[in-house]
Amino acid sequence: MKKAAALILALVFTAAGLTGLTAAGADSLYIIPDSNTRELTYDELWGYQYDTLLYAFNEIYARHGYKFETGSRCYNWFTMMPWYKPNESESSKNHHETYSQCSAIENRNVDLIKSVRREMRELGITNSGGKGMPTPPAQNVNKPRGFEYVNLKAGQKLPVYSAPSSYAFRANNGKALVNTNGAVYALGWDNGWMLMLYEANYAGQYRVGYVDGSAIRGNRPNLDYLTWEMEPCEVIQGTSLTDDPALTGNAMTYLPEGTKVTYLTSMFNNTAWDYIETTIDGQTARGFVPEGTLSIGGPDMTEETDGEG
């Protein structure tokens, strides 16, 4: 199964935060609120953006607890939704239970959405003027969602790299460190490296980066393993690359239009980010660019397999 790690990332909604949701408010948490009860039409689906339709057909599966690959773009999106309850009894490779729960209307709608996406691909368009994704639910702290607090042994100062390698670009003039006396939030493991978010020693900035798991003293956090989409694409609108999508957005480097990069996944906090791999001064580097600045989701983008039957 094709997987995209990423993203994003979910702080748990509190009961107080969910109390008093109106029907209209609840509907705003869905891409197509009634796709499970009404036959969708060809014409209305052509009113959506190509990439939005990927989430739309996976939303049908998500209603039934489809267990998305940890860190994939669909995982990152649906774990933000208070209505989403993953079926923990399912194997990540066997989703027969989810498929069997879908109604005839739902299966018909999935097929139609995929058909419209295929037509868009074949015509070479992304329907960028169509309906996009809903606004993610607000949260009090603007950290990327899905990173969970991890209890690391105190008193450690660990080197932080922007990609999972000691040869990768290292921020703060090559001196980026995480102090485990402070709060550390982690997403998962990538080839023995822990992807985490922490507050930099100077106040007012967070950083997303990697620490070598073999350098961590004490118990290693029990986290899922991450696999990225690794989709070649290019920058279609010049933009800064940042390792702090939570607060400052400070630039690691600037990526001019036409720069070739590798798309890893999409992540969400109070906005949407694409997580990518590129190079800085000849060193591998990973970071975030605003959604909409890359050529992903276009006609050459392969079909996401999350939720595919």
Image (cartoon, grey):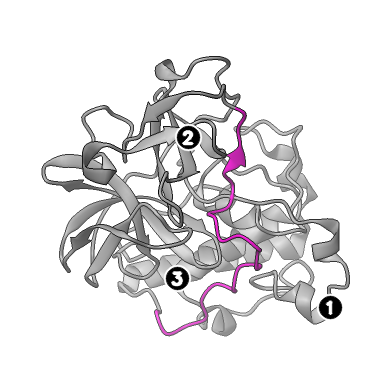
Q: Circle 1 sits on which residue?
A: 23
* Percent of width and height locating residue 265: 42, 51
Residue at x 33% of width, y 51% of height: 287
Measuring from the top left, give residue 246's x and y in whole percent: 48, 58
The disc, 1 or 3, on the residue closer to the chain's N-terminal end is 1
Percent position of residue 161, x then y: 31, 36
Q: CA distance from mark 3 to mark 2?
A: 26 Å
Q: Is residue 151 visible?
A: yes
Q: Looking at the image, is mark 1 or mark 2 earlier in the sequence?
A: 1
Q: Can you tell which mark lies on residue 226?
A: 2
Q: Are marks 3 and 2 in contact (CB under 8 Å)?
A: no
Span shown in magenta: 128-151
At label 1, the amino acid type is Ala
Q: Is residue 138 magenta?
A: yes
Neighbours of disc 2 within 10 Å: few (<14), some (14-19), many (20+): many
Say which amino acid is labelled 3: Tyr
| CA–CA distance in space, label 1 to label 2 | 36 Å
Circle 1 or circle 3, nearest the eye: 1
Could you tell which of marks 3 and 2 lies nearer the N-terminus? 3
Find numbered disc 3 in the image and state the secondary structure of the residue it sits on: helix
- Write down the residue under mark 3: 50
Q: Return the x and y of residue 307 as percentages of the image width and height.
A: 59, 49
Disc 2, SS? loop
Up-down relation of residue 155 to residue 105 (above or below)? above
Kindly identify which numbered label has been placed on residue 259: none
Task: Look at 58% across and 83% down and name the residue there.
Answer: 44
User: Residue at the location (31% across, 41% down)?
Assistant: 162
**58 to 279, vertically: above or below:** below
